[in-house]
Image (cartoon, rainbow, N blue to C red):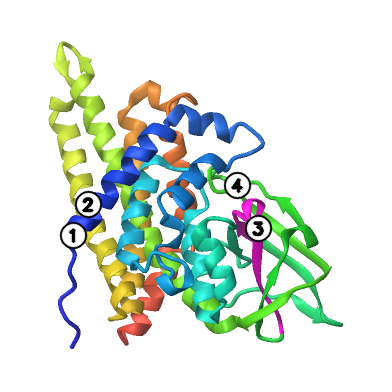
Amino acid sequence: MSAQPDLLYSEEEEALRAAVRDLLTDHCDPAGVIARTESGTPHDRALWKALAEGMGLAGLLVPEESGGQGATHREAAVALEELGRSVAPVPYLTSAVVATEALLACGAEDLLGELAAGRRIGALAVGLHTAPGAAFAVVRVEDGTLHGKLTGIADAGAADVLLVPADDGVLYAVDPDAVTIAPSTSLDLTRPVAAVVLDAAPGRAIGDAEGAVRRALRAGAGLLASEQLGLADRLLADTVHHLEQRKQFNRQVGGFQALKHRLARLWLEVAGLRAAARNAADALATGEDTDVAVAVAQAYASQVAVHAAEEALQLHGGIGMTWEHPVHLYLKRAKADSIAYGTAGAHREALAQLADLPAP
């Protein structure tokens, strides 16, 4: 029987949270994020450099002997909570978590060191919608080169190395300059997706694709819940603050009973999400009941994040409908996250199988 998970934050984790929040407060204001989404460069390279090189966050999951920080998924989850609170346009989840986990599975020490130091950004060339355990698209190997098209690849445009699974069961490291990256229409403008076309692209074999992709997607799904938690928690706090300041009929809007009930319900949902997300992060760190914990977190997280964004949009009134207000960034991120690394339905189905409770 597994030990009781520790869902509380340690002093070190709270110190990490404070440091990341201070940095994001100074360098990731809502107006700046909105302006960046309107530009041709949605990724904030300066912010990424500060996070990856300045604070070492890109190497949290990388062992010290490989050039990383030697931390655990719990610390990475705290970082993702804060990045979710700011809807930060940086490839942290895709590079520092998903690509890093794939490289850890393959034992690619040189690439791990470069990602950990922030010198390169990695992207796993598997569709963002792919759930852990689901089938994923691969490219063909012909005459020692790679051929094919992969779609829905998150942050491919920012990557310095693509990790591409092939039909020979091998994961290849591919230089983005050797492929064609075609941006796709993305609801979440802070995490763009693209199609990757390989036409006789050279690649370096780094390990078994099946195991690496499964491990990477499981970590991505589990820690995505922490990003969704940060997003929902920020929206709840901002909505409460707005309703405390807003007045109608000479009364504080937040004093209306109907709105109190809606906020109370949302608070309970966010509290539940915090428990599920922390449990998933702890399970990834300890290896205890990991598949179940990840499935539970993602079966619950999406609906809470989307509900928090919808409530924030409505309760901010007319100003919430404007482009200048950042709530639309959170709604788009929440909606996009709801299908990232598997839908809630896919995770419920996986959970039913893990618990030996199949549908009738």
Q: Quadrant of residue 225?
A: bottom left
Q: Which mark is residue 10?
A: 1
Choose the circle earlier in sequence order: 1 or 4.
1
Kindly identify the amino acid type of the residue bearing the numbered disc 4. Ser
For image coordinates 23% across by 19% down, the residue present is 246
Q: Nearer the viewer, residue 115 or 194?
A: 115
Q: Position of residue 295 (x, y in %)?
A: 36, 71
Going by the image, does 166 lie left or right of 357? right
Which residue matches tag 4? 186
Q: Is residue 358 at least partly visible in the picture?
A: no
Q: Are marks 3 and 4 in contact (CB under 8 Å)?
A: no
Choose the circle earlier in sequence order: 3 or 4.
3
Q: Which mark is residue 14?
A: 2
Which quadrant is the C terminus positioned in?
bottom left
Kindly identify the amino acid type of the residue bearing the numbered disc 2. Glu
Going by the image, does 248 lie left or right of 217? left
For image coordinates 15% across by 11% down, the residue present is 250
What secondary structure is found at the residue carrying circle 4? loop
Query: What segment carries the magenta color?
Result: 152-167
Q: Nearer the viewer, residue 111 or 252?
A: 111
Q: Are marks 1 and 2 in contact (CB under 8 Å)?
A: yes
Which quadrant is the N terminus positioned in?
bottom left
Q: Nearer the viewer, residue 291 or 50?
A: 50
Which residue matches tag 3? 160
For label 2, the crowd category at 10 Å Cα-Cα, with few meaning under 14, some 14 to 19 and many 20 or more, is few
